[in-house]
Image (cartoon, rainbow, N blue to C red):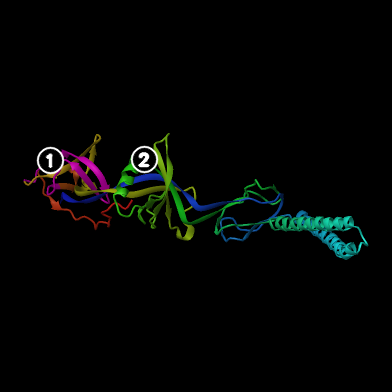
Amino acid sequence: MLVTEVVQKDVPVYQEAIGTLTGYINASIRPQVKGYLLSKNYKEGDVVHAGDLLFQIDPREFQAALDQAQGQLARAQAAQVKTQQDVTRYTPLAKEGAVSQKELDDAIQANLAAKAQADSARAAVVQAKLNLDWTKVTSPIDGVSGIAVSQVGDLVEPTTVMTTVSQLDPIKVSFPIAEQLYLRLANNRLKEAENKPRAGALELILADGKAFPQRGTITVIGRQVDPRTGTLTLEGQFPNPGNILRPGGYALVRAIVDNLPNATVVPQRAVQDFQGTSQVAVVTPENKVEIRNVTTGPRSGSDWAIMDGVKPGERVIVEGLQKVRGGMTVAPKPYTAPAPALTPTVAPF
């Protein structure tokens, strides 16, 4: 029969929320021109860099349009040169009366119209070059590439989402908290000198139940409370070396929101549930067993805060609970607890 003393210590109070992982940046890859897809030029799931070629659209139509625009520009420039020559030739002749002033004015106006036509043709060449360049669909960011939606031979257009590229380091997690909790935390922040979320306040528990080794920080507090659920959405960021975490993944976010000073604490193994009531087995100074109902508080590591039912210094049974009954005499031996994990004693949320 192993027993340990009820002790007093500060107990951090954790708040948990279920959230969803999402990329820091999620770029939907869409073409800027309409055409048939010739090739896919990346390996799905690999890391790509800004400017890397992802898809190639058939460029022939756009090359032809560029050639046509360049021809029209050359014709407009030739017309501009001719009208400029007319103005140059008519100007001294008009002073001598060899040509009428109207002929000079007409030449000047024709020259201005030719300049405008050349400028328009020059802009058409720029647009044609852009359209030709846009047949190469590239990644706008560094990130992890998604599975291609568009396949070779598909007719794609600017509304077509061809794939998605996500920047995953850091990664974001979105999670809701109750309005009451938000107000309590916000009021606590107003009382502090540094009124901003603390770095490393968030802990992330993954779908396999294990804690993610990197800690996160709150980066965004939502604009409004959802009137349907009474919750406010928060966003946090976690370093994600190696892109281990992926968008859409399950995320249980934990954070310390309060601290119970000098709380009465027993090992969690000392507490048993009996028909919905928490109980502990207390060993009296006469080594008699007393079964007591207790009111439990927050858990901290392997310990459990007891709000009512036992006092500091009393002994509780940690191992052998199933073998004891109230009033029986036992021969207790001291219980050696494993080394406790270090836990913060202040609320870093």
Q: Is residue 37 left or right of residue 247?
A: right
Distance between the alpha carbons at the discs numbered 1 and 2: 40 Å
Give coordinates of residue 213: x percent, y percent. Answer: 38, 57
Give coordinates of residue 168: x percent, y percent. Answer: 49, 56
Q: Amino acid at mark 1?
A: Glu
Q: Is residue 252 visible?
A: yes
Give coordinates of residue 290: x percent, y percent. Answer: 12, 40
Element at label 2? strand
Q: Which residue is at the far front?
A: 96
Taking the magenta stretch, the answer to whether it contains residue 296 is yes
Element at label 1? strand
Measured along the vertical axis of the image, is residue 252 above or below residue 116? above
Mark nearer the N terminus (1 vs 2): 2
- Within 10 angstroms of label 2, few (less than 14), some, or many (20 or more) residues? some
Q: Is residue 219 left or right of residue 30?
A: left
Disc sitting over residue 153 in the figure? none
| Residue sitting nearer the eye, 296 or 335 | 296
| Residue sitting nearer the eye, 180 or 192 | 192
Q: Is residue 66 left or right of residue 166?
A: right
Q: Amino acid at mark 2?
A: Ala
Q: Is residue 338 left or right of residue 141?
A: left
Q: Which residue is mark 2?
A: 178
Residue interval drawn in magenta: 286-315
| Residue sitting nearer the eye, 71 or 180 | 71
Disc sitting over residue 290 in the figure? 1
